[in-house]
Amino acid sequence: MDTQVQAPVPDQAQVQEHRFSFTGTGAEYFRIWIVNLVLTILTLGIFSAWAKVRRLQYFYRNTHMGGSSFDYHGSPIAILKGRIIGLLLFAAYTFSFKFNPLLWLCVVLCIGLIMPYLLATSFRFRLYNSSYRGLRFGFTGSVGGAYGVFLGLPLAAMFTMYLLAPLAHHRIKAYQHNNSRFGQTPFSFNARELGFYKIYLVALLQWLALMLTLGIIAAVTLWSMAGGMSKERMMIAVVMVIYGVMIVSSLLISPYFQSRMQNLIWNGTRLQQSGFSSTMRARKLAWIVFSNFFLIILTLGLYKPFAAVRLARYRMEQLAFLSAGSMDEFIASEQQQAGAAGMETAEFFDIDVGL
């Protein structure tokens, strides 16, 4: 039984809409991106932590809402610690199987046991180091809660042939949003589980229909080519067709899933009496994803920073904050409360796994 309580909705006459916007340009970000790429290669990946800070600061500082921008304050050293931990876990996972399958299984179990803790720590780090008008965000989710949503529910979904996957997804977003805050004011998450199931079901039906159509086309094409092809070339053709079907499926289904999920999640998120509005459209997102993909291919990857800016701009333009009252008064009140209560220091949240 669903016991979630919907937050009271303020009088519509008092609601002030503050739309998000993104002011960055592809040319600006390209300069940051190319320098990050070169230095990361020259330092054998060490600079990637500094590159991540530069990237996040650019996107945060170019994201505006209510006449002000966001900011990111993360430490590259803390991110580097997380990268080292992630690299060690990945190396243990990759190479343990070559020595002993039983050892590999033990490594997998250890990673599964430690990952929820690392994710909870990473959420704290990311939110604490994010700010708006000088006021920090925060995350209060418990490690026990992280084990429930990142380990218990995914295992339950796996053992039910993923029938519980939408429920697990819902609980993960609820854990993230219900435990987040801006200053001293907590967010709340009121989206229903049924909405997640609807999106997953429609995406699954679209995927099945697309796979059937593309499968028939591929089968007919391969059959017509089979007469003059060797077995080796036939196998290569089959592999290429399979990969082609997977890419096309991803490009067609992913925009629907992402747009509907963003709308559902943000329309179901509140900050005290205020809320959010997300109006992302699947067709528009699909066009952006399609064109970005082909332009990245045609430019041998050089269009990637332009694609990232283009996608970020569209996502932000479809999002708005619905303030129940004066935004300035709310910020001033939060700054006073934060100053009186004191904000926790980042020393306790000093790693960012970046997953």
Image (cartoon, rainbow, N blue to C red):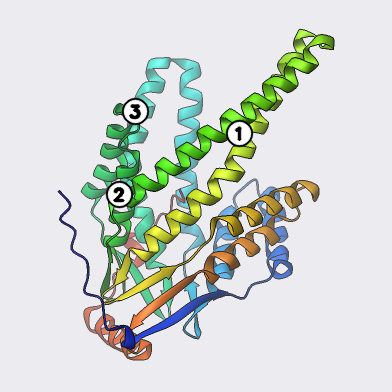
Residue 57 screen position, x and y as percent: 55, 69
- The 10 Å Cα crowd at callout 2, few under 14, some 14 to 19, many 20 or more, is few
Residues at circles 1 and 3 in contact by the CB criterion of under 8 Å: no
Residue depicted at x 54% and y 46%? 254
Q: Residues within 10 Å of mark 1 (few under 14, many from 20)?
A: few
Q: Which mark is residue 246?
A: 1
Whether residue 82 is visible? yes
Judging by the rendered image, the residue that carries numbered circle 2 is 194
User: Residue 276 in the image: x percent, y percent?
Assistant: 38, 71
- Is mark 2 in CB contact (under 8 Å) with mark 1? no
Q: Earlier in the sequence, mark 2 or mark 3?
A: 3
Where is residue 52, by image quadrant?
A: bottom right
Q: In the displayed structure, does residue 288 sit left or right of residue 162? A: right
Horizontally, residue 290 falls left or right of residue 178, namely right
Give the residue type at disc 1. Met
Dot 1 or dot 3: first in sequence order is 3
Residue depicted at x 65% and y 30% = 243
Alpha carbon separation for disc pair 2 and 3 = 18 Å
Quadrant location of residue 325? bottom left
Would you say 252 lies left or right of 147 here?
right
Circle 2 — which element?
Answer: helix
Decide which of 209, 37 is in the foreground and name it.
Answer: 209
Q: Nearer the viewer, mark 2 or mark 1?
A: 2
The residue singled out by tag 3 in the image is: 161
Do the residues bearing badges 2 and 3 touch, measured as CB atoms within 8 Å? Answer: no
Q: Secondary structure at mark 1?
A: helix
Q: Amino acid at mark 2?
A: Leu
Location of residue 117 in the rendering, given as x and y in whole percent from the top left corner: 31, 46
> Along the line of sight, which residue is nearer the eye, 245 or 50?
245
Going by the numbered disc 3, the residue's amino acid type is Met
